[in-house]
Image: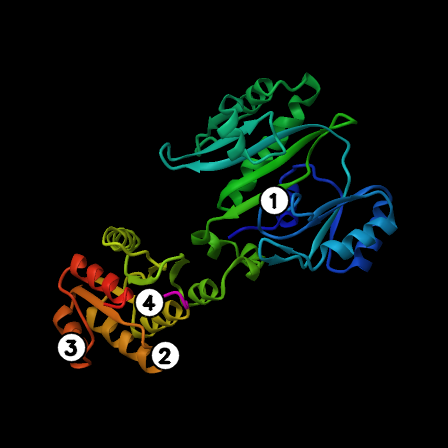
Amino acid sequence: MKLHEYQSKRVFADHGVPIPNGEVAETPAQVREIAKRLAGPVVIKSQVLVGGRGKAGGIKVAKSVDEAEALAKQILGMDIKGLTVEKVLVDEAADIKKEIYLGIVIDRALQKPVLITSAEGGVEIEEVAKTNPEAIIRLPVDPNQGLLDFQARSLASQLGLKQAFINQFVKIAKGLYQSFVDTDASLAEINPLVVTGDERLMAVDGKIVLDDNALYRHPNLADMRDIQEETPSEREARHAGLNFVKLDGEIGCMVNGAGLAMATMDIVNHFGGEPANFLDIGGGAKADKVAAALRIILSDPNVKSVLFNIFGGITRCDEVAKGILTALEEVKTDVPMVARLVGTNQEEGQKILAEANFPSATSLGEAAQKAVQLAKGA
């Protein structure tokens, strides 16, 4: 789950990171009032969860109250990469002299958070990594100790910051790290962290990506979810407790277990098909959950066949079979399907499907081949 810029920066501010004065608005009139209160040049920034807002015209600087209102009329309601701008952040314009990138992610190989920084801020860090990888500095952080002052000072020195900025940088780096930890984030970044004309460091943009698996610990953050970020099918899957990602293929896949789901997608691809989704119904799925999953798959008009691959451990094959038939009673479709049920109560599950004349397969390879052939109209 992604937080908007204004939400991310408020989290950072709660952890001691300096941010510009600013407020969120939903109408041009509100923008005018905020600009009047800030009493100076302001930046009007569209709040949508995609990159490239500036290039799309979603970030503008206004030097007067009238200009701020006029620009707000242009930005509010505009479409940026398929998302409608419903809110804007009105910030004091900063006198920017230098831009720095500062972020933190989990390095799964090291099994540690890694702080990443670069003197080439203001652009996507992926672009810096591609064009000038030497400009990126990485610091693994021991999660038992956290980010230590001397480590942050070392980073500041490597960035070439003057002595006057060292203590500020230490405070900001530690605030960013604590924001990352306290929100159970998978990414927290400030881009850019700027040096201003009055010799201050300030986070003028921010981004936090939360680990969905930890949201139960942060109901206040979960409430910040922007439903525009999700497709209707992804939203329905979340409410049903399903792990679902929509893809561009034509073969719908329903599997229990993330690893098995990935393997199923690979085998579909191996036999010449393209998966339409990643969908993990999880362990112990009952008939109602299976039915919900099938409804989500069939809501995709690109799906030309559906492959069920269930390895029954906690999940019972007979419950899955009942769920498939229940869903087909609720959602009438002529999309062809094939099921491979193996494991707990597989004989019962296969019998239920056989009595309903539902196609089945004994191996994953056979099931994937059938699904590909069915999608091609064979």
Comparing labels 4 and 1, the label whose residue is closer to the camera: 4
Mark 3 to mark 1 CA distance (whole Å): 52 Å
**Dot 2 corresponds to which residue?**
331
Specify few, some or many for label 1: CA neighbours under 10 Å numbering under 14, 14-19, or 20 or more: some
Q: Vertical placement of 11 versus 147: above or below?
A: below
Comparing labels 3 and 4, the label whose residue is closer to the camera: 4
Which quadrant of the figure has residue 273? bottom left
Mark 2 to mark 1 CA distance (whole Å): 39 Å
Mark 4 to mark 1 CA distance (whole Å): 34 Å
Question: SS at mark 3?
Answer: helix
Comparing labels 4 and 2, the label whose residue is closer to the camera: 4
The answer to which of marks 3 and 4 sits earlier in the sequence is 4
Mark 4 to mark 2 CA distance (whole Å): 15 Å
Q: Which amino acid type is marked by label 4?
A: Lys
Majority secondary structure in the magenta region: loop
Question: SS at mark 1?
Answer: loop
Mark 3 to mark 4 CA distance (whole Å): 22 Å
State the image coordinates of residue 128 (x, y, percent, origin top left): 54, 29
- The residue sitting at 58% across, 43% down in the picture is 207
State the image coordinates of residue 278 (x, y, percent, origin top left): 35, 57
**Dot 4 corresponds to which residue?**
304
The answer to which of marks 4 and 1 sits earlier in the sequence is 1
Question: SS at mark 4?
Answer: loop
Q: Vertical placement of 159 versus 348: above or below?
A: above
Q: Nearer the viewer, residue 238 or 219?
A: 238
The answer to which of marks 3 and 2 sits earlier in the sequence is 2
**Which residues fall within the magenta stretch?**
300-304
